[in-house]
Image (cartoon, helix red, strand yellow):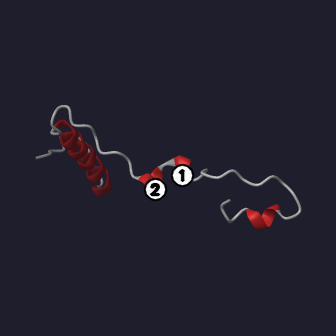
């Protein structure tokens, strides 16, 4: 149970504070030695730059879309 002692928070502020408390509680309840889950592959910045861009030239604009 969370009790607001001072001030008058908006519903959004209260929801944000509750989300932080819940996240901290979930992290504290993780069994010791268990690693956090790996981040999703779609968020890996290396995925964006897998292929080198073609060198500049007359037809380079046409080759930028297709991977080599």
Q: Are marks 1 and 2 in contact (CB under 8 Å)?
A: yes
The relative height of residue 60 versus residue 16 in the rendered view (above or below) is below
Between residue 35 and residue 18, name the one nearer to us.
Answer: 35
Left or right relative to 50: residue 17: left
Q: Is residue 6 above or below residue 18?
A: above
Find residue 55 and report its horizontal and vertical position in percent.
81, 52
Residue 8 visible in the displayed image: no
Left or right: 19, with 57 as reference point: left
Which quarter shows the C terminus?
bottom right
Q: Earlier in the sequence, mark 1 or mark 2?
A: 2
Q: CA distance from mark 1 to mark 2?
A: 7 Å
Nearer to me, 24 or 66: 66
Q: How many marks?
A: 2
Residue 38 location (% of width, % of height): 34, 45
Residue 42's disc number: 2
Residue of label 1: 47
Q: For numbered disc 2, what is the local secondary structure?
A: helix
Mark drawn on residue 4 = none
Q: Residue furthest left?
A: 1
Please tell me how crowded label 1 is: few (under 14), some (14-19), or many (20+) other residues with Cα within 10 Å. few
Q: Residue at x 54, y 52 (%)?
A: 47
């Amino acid at each position: 149970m969370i009790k607001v002692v001072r001030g008058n928070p908006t519903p959004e502020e209260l929801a944000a504070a509750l989300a932080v408390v819940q996240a901290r509680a979930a992290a504290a309840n993780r069994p010791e030695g268990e690693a956090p889950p790996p981040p999703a592959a779609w968020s890996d910045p290396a995925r964006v730059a897998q292929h080198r861009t073609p060198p500049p030239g007359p037809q380079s604009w046409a080759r930028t879309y297709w991977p080599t």
